[in-house]
Protein backbone atom coordinates (compact mmCIF):
# COMPACT_ATOMS: atom_id res chain seq x y z
CA UNK A 1 0.00 0.00 0.00
CA UNK A 2 1.04 3.47 -0.71
CA UNK A 3 1.65 6.05 1.95
CA UNK A 4 -1.16 8.21 0.58
CA UNK A 5 -3.62 5.32 0.83
CA UNK A 6 -2.68 4.76 4.47
CA UNK A 7 -3.14 8.47 5.21
CA UNK A 8 -6.56 8.50 3.55
CA UNK A 9 -7.62 5.33 5.42
CA UNK A 10 -6.45 6.88 8.71
CA UNK A 11 -8.30 10.09 7.88
CA UNK A 12 -11.48 8.15 7.05
CA UNK A 13 -11.19 6.11 10.26
CA UNK A 14 -10.49 9.26 12.28
CA UNK A 15 -13.48 11.09 10.80
CA UNK A 16 -15.63 7.97 11.25
CA UNK A 17 -14.59 7.80 14.91
CA UNK A 18 -15.44 11.48 15.43
CA UNK A 19 -18.83 11.06 13.75
CA UNK A 20 -19.54 7.92 15.80
CA UNK A 21 -18.59 9.73 19.04
CA UNK A 22 -20.80 12.68 18.08
CA UNK A 23 -23.76 10.41 17.36
CA UNK A 24 -23.32 8.44 20.60
CA UNK A 25 -22.94 11.67 22.61
CA UNK A 26 -26.02 13.16 20.91
CA UNK A 27 -28.12 10.09 21.72
CA UNK A 28 -26.89 10.11 25.33
CA UNK A 29 -27.59 13.84 25.79
CA UNK A 30 -31.02 13.49 24.19
CA UNK A 31 -32.02 10.61 26.48
CA UNK A 32 -30.56 12.40 29.50
CA UNK A 33 -32.54 15.58 28.75
CA UNK A 34 -35.75 13.63 28.20
CA UNK A 35 -35.26 11.72 31.47
CA UNK A 36 -34.43 14.94 33.33
CA UNK A 37 -37.52 16.76 32.03
CA UNK A 38 -39.69 13.82 33.11
CA UNK A 39 -38.07 13.91 36.55
CA UNK A 40 -38.67 17.65 36.87
CA UNK A 41 -42.40 17.10 36.34
CA UNK A 42 -42.39 14.39 39.02
CA UNK A 43 -40.36 16.54 41.41
CA UNK A 44 -42.75 19.48 40.92
CA UNK A 45 -45.75 17.26 41.67
CA UNK A 46 -44.06 15.89 44.80
CA UNK A 47 -43.06 19.40 45.91
CA UNK A 48 -46.62 20.66 45.43
CA UNK A 49 -48.03 17.73 47.42
CA UNK A 50 -45.47 18.27 50.17
CA UNK A 51 -46.25 22.00 50.30
CA UNK A 52 -49.98 21.37 50.65
CA UNK A 53 -49.23 18.88 53.44
CA UNK A 54 -47.05 21.48 55.20
CA UNK A 55 -49.82 24.05 54.79
CA UNK A 56 -52.34 21.57 56.22
CA UNK A 57 -50.08 21.09 59.25
CA UNK A 58 -49.95 24.86 59.78
CA UNK A 59 -53.72 25.18 59.37
CA UNK A 60 -54.31 22.36 61.88
CA UNK A 61 -52.68 24.57 64.51
CA UNK A 62 -55.51 27.08 63.97
CA UNK A 63 -58.47 24.70 63.63
CA UNK A 64 -59.77 25.11 67.20
CA UNK A 65 -59.75 28.91 67.21
CA UNK A 66 -63.26 30.25 67.52
CA UNK A 67 -64.15 33.71 66.31
CA UNK A 68 -67.34 35.73 66.27
CA UNK A 69 -68.02 35.92 62.60
CA UNK A 70 -71.16 36.85 60.70
CA UNK A 71 -71.42 36.68 56.96
CA UNK A 72 -73.81 39.03 55.16
CA UNK A 73 -74.94 36.38 52.73
CA UNK A 74 -75.05 33.38 55.10
CA UNK A 75 -78.86 33.18 54.83
CA UNK A 76 -78.75 32.23 51.17
CA UNK A 77 -79.48 28.66 50.20
CA UNK A 78 -76.51 26.88 48.71
CA UNK A 79 -75.64 23.57 47.14
CA UNK A 80 -72.32 21.99 46.31
CA UNK A 81 -72.64 23.37 42.79
CA UNK A 82 -73.26 26.95 43.88
CA UNK A 83 -71.37 29.03 41.31
CA UNK A 84 -68.59 31.47 41.97
CA UNK A 85 -69.75 34.63 43.64
CA UNK A 86 -68.09 37.97 44.00
CA UNK A 87 -68.08 40.34 45.80
CA UNK A 88 -68.34 38.70 49.20
CA UNK A 89 -69.57 40.44 52.31
CA UNK A 90 -68.13 40.06 55.80
CA UNK A 91 -69.40 41.58 59.03
CA UNK A 92 -66.80 41.71 61.77
CA UNK A 93 -65.69 43.96 64.57
CA UNK A 94 -64.46 46.35 61.86
CA UNK A 95 -67.95 46.69 60.39
CA UNK A 96 -69.45 45.44 57.14
CA UNK A 97 -67.02 45.08 54.26
CA UNK A 98 -67.44 43.97 50.66
CA UNK A 99 -64.50 42.35 48.92
CA UNK A 100 -64.13 41.62 45.24
CA UNK A 101 -62.22 38.35 44.77
CA UNK A 102 -60.78 37.65 41.32
CA UNK A 103 -61.96 34.39 39.78
CA UNK A 104 -58.36 33.10 39.46
CA UNK A 105 -57.83 33.37 43.22
CA UNK A 106 -61.15 31.70 43.86
CA UNK A 107 -60.46 28.73 41.56
CA UNK A 108 -56.86 28.21 42.72
CA UNK A 109 -57.42 28.86 46.40
CA UNK A 110 -56.59 26.57 49.29
CA UNK A 111 -60.27 26.24 50.21
CA UNK A 112 -63.16 26.53 47.76
CA UNK A 113 -66.04 26.76 50.22
CA UNK A 114 -66.86 30.45 50.51
CA UNK A 115 -67.88 30.39 54.18
CA UNK A 116 -64.81 28.43 55.25
CA UNK A 117 -62.65 30.75 53.19
CA UNK A 118 -64.11 33.79 54.95
CA UNK A 119 -63.49 32.33 58.40
CA UNK A 120 -59.97 31.22 57.46
CA UNK A 121 -59.17 34.68 56.09
CA UNK A 122 -60.33 36.24 59.32
CA UNK A 123 -58.34 33.78 61.48
CA UNK A 124 -55.20 34.26 59.36
CA UNK A 125 -55.54 38.00 59.82
CA UNK A 126 -55.37 37.49 63.59
CA UNK A 127 -52.89 34.58 63.57
CA UNK A 128 -50.82 34.96 60.37
CA UNK A 129 -48.66 32.22 58.91
CA UNK A 130 -44.94 32.23 59.59
CA UNK A 131 -42.98 31.89 56.35
CA UNK A 132 -39.98 30.40 58.17
CA UNK A 133 -42.02 27.75 59.98
CA UNK A 134 -43.88 26.83 56.82
CA UNK A 135 -40.63 26.59 54.82
CA UNK A 136 -38.94 24.41 57.45
CA UNK A 137 -41.93 22.08 57.50
CA UNK A 138 -41.95 21.93 53.70
CA UNK A 139 -38.19 21.27 53.58
CA UNK A 140 -38.48 18.43 56.09
CA UNK A 141 -41.28 16.82 54.06
CA UNK A 142 -39.20 17.10 50.88
CA UNK A 143 -36.16 15.64 52.65
CA UNK A 144 -38.24 12.69 53.85
CA UNK A 145 -39.06 12.01 50.17
CA UNK A 146 -35.34 12.22 49.25
CA UNK A 147 -35.81 15.44 47.30
CA UNK A 148 -33.07 18.00 47.76
CA UNK A 149 -34.26 21.39 46.61
CA UNK A 150 -33.83 25.04 47.40
CA UNK A 151 -37.23 26.29 48.47
CA UNK A 152 -38.58 29.67 49.30
CA UNK A 153 -41.91 30.95 50.49
CA UNK A 154 -43.33 34.40 50.05
CA UNK A 155 -46.41 35.30 52.04
CA UNK A 156 -48.30 38.30 50.74
CA UNK A 157 -51.20 39.95 52.48
CA UNK A 158 -53.74 42.41 51.20
CA UNK A 159 -55.02 45.18 53.42
CA UNK A 160 -58.71 44.92 52.64
CA UNK A 161 -59.49 47.81 55.01
CA UNK A 162 -57.10 50.10 53.09
Image (cartoon, rainbow, N blue to C red):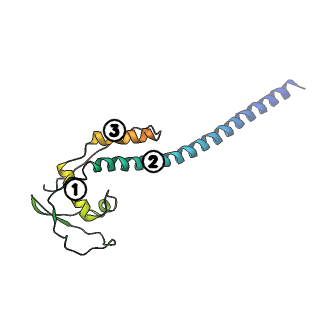
Mark carried by residue 46: 2
18 vs 112, nearest the viewer: 112
The quarter of the displayed image where residue 79 is located: bottom left
Q: Residue at x 35, y 46 (%)?
A: 54
7 vs 129, nearest the viewer: 129
Q: CA distance from mark 2 to mark 3?
A: 16 Å
Q: Residue at x 45, y 50 (%)?
A: 45
Q: Residues within 10 Å of mark 2 (few under 14, many from 20)?
A: some
55 vs 102, nearest the viewer: 55
Q: CA distance from mark 3 to mark 1?
A: 23 Å
How many discs mark residues in the rendered view?
3
Residue furthest to the top in view is 3
Residue 14: give x, y in percent of width and height: 75, 30
**Residue corresponding to mark 1:** 121
In the displayed structure, 158 sits above or below 33; it is below
In the displayed structure, 14 sits above or below 58; it is above
Q: Is residue 6 left or right of residue 99?
A: right
Mark carried by residue 34: none
Badge 2 or badge 3: first in the primary sequence:
2
Residue 114: give x, y in percent of width and height: 26, 64
Amino acid sequence: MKKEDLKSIRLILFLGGIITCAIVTGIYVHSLCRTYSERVVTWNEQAQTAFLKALDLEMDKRKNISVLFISCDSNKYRTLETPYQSPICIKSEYGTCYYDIPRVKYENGYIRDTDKRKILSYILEIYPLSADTLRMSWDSLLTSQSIKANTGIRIATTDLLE
